[in-house]
Image (cartoon, grey):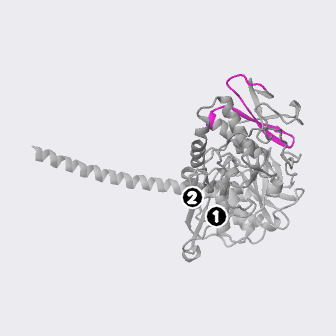
Amino acid sequence: MKKFIGLFIVCLGWVTSVQAQNFEEEFNAFMNQNQQQFNNFVDSINKQFAEAMAANMKAFTGEQPMVRDPKPKPDKLPEIKKDNVPELPVVKPQLPPQESPDKPVEDKPSSIPAEQFNFLDFNLFGENVHLIKKPFPSGLKGITVDDVSDFWVQLSECDYEEMLQRCRIARQQQAFNDWAIYQLVLRMAQQTYDHQYNEQVVMTVFLLNQLGMEAKVGFAQTHLFCLIAVEQQLYGISFVDIAGKRYYVFELDPYYNHIKSSMAFRTYDIPFPESTHGLDMNLPQPLKSIETANAEEEIHINLSMIELFKTYPQVNLEVYANATPSKMFRESIEQSFKPYLKTQSTYDAVSFLLAYLQYGFDYATDDEQFGFEKPFFCEENYYYPYNDCEDRSVLFSFLVRHLLHLDVVLIDYPGHVAAAVHFPTEVKGEYVQHKGKKYVICDPTYIGAPVGMEMPDFTPADRSVIPLQ
């Protein structure tokens, strides 16, 4: 009887296996058929869009780039007399001098030449990208709208799905945000069309559109450029308003990298049907790629994040303050500050962090350090040799929120940025009200100033509150 039962189970397992195999084959065939139908549908959309592109061209003029704060920052920091400087942790890494972020980030050399095996092979933000080169059209005939329309159709008939899939994987597995995805798409286009800048523009816009991002090809008399919708305000970059949304001008050819904002150009005002949103500059998750810079003082920064930050245009301050730093940075910050904060009251702990920001960093304006405005994300304060008021306020806001779990807002003044903290108990000093809460001003750049002291040149009318998460 036991032998019979065993034989029955084996037979049942064989039948089940055969049925499962048949089901899997039928399922795969069904999926392949539906994938082909979907691909045909997308191809049809691209062809119809290419035709509509030529029929919906309009003339535009670039708007002047926005300036976040036209008033220059002070060259020398104000300081109050203070006899006893508090004992502070020495946690600022002494890294070697770093390159300015305006210099291009070079690809890391591959051990095998990519051209030898017909690969797209590069490193981006610590992530190795390896793709088989697929045949794409050789290039544009010209830069008329008909030329671009024809080239768009040719791209739609090529096998670009692996590129899109690589972008989806980077988003899901490496936590690439929209800006990092744009950089990935751009690098793919650059590798595919080396020194063919107009082709790079069309391919970049084409791939962004397939990924659901709003972008357009801009037509100037001598070249093409990318018009990209962004969900946040960008500064220092020309833009144009199309159907109530700002599209920012991104030049891929270095020769045209500083175009006049009043430049007249043409583009189409119809949206790509599958595009649903502009680029979101927020960084809710840190990159999963890890390239560590270990400092003697045990603060660790992720160089993959630094490379991403080097590519960032200037955005609203809350984007910098709300970005999530890398895990290694957060953990090393906790370990470094824990011995100094564990026995202190909330007020004393905030005072300690405030003094650390005031005395622990060397000051320089962005103009002095870079030649242009560049607010820092938290980790960048430990990468570059100097920082200024908004950089210190962003880092201070992170330390107070992360280590002490208190609410913080930024205070934006003409030519200056500070912070303000919501204490659980009454604290004296200058303050602002926001959504029914009292936030006491803390200025990380006013050397020696205690909690509640504001720079004397400012009045309540000068304050603008920037809420943070």
Residue flagged by tag 2: what amino acid is it? Arg
- Residue 209 in view: no
Query: Horizontal placement of 181 versus 420: left or right?
Result: left
Q: Residue at x 57, y 43 (%)?
A: 335
Residue 271 location in percent, x, y?
A: 73, 50
Asked if the residue at tag 2 contacts the one at tag 1, i.e. Cβ–Cβ closer than 8 Å, the answer is yes
From the image, which quarter does the C terminus lie in?
top right
Residue flagged by tag 1: what amino acid is it? Met
Residue 103 location in percent, x, y?
A: 74, 63
Q: Residue at x 60, y 70 (%)?
A: 109
Identify residue for label 1.
188
Q: Quadrant of residue 184?
A: bottom right
Residue 11 location in percent, x, y?
A: 20, 50
Question: What are the residue bounds of the magenta stretch?
Answer: 403-428
Identify residue for label 2.
166
Which of the two labelled residues, at mark 1 and mark 2, occupies the earlier sequence position?
2
Residue 30 location in percent, x, y?
A: 45, 53
Q: Residue at x 74, y 41 (%)?
A: 393
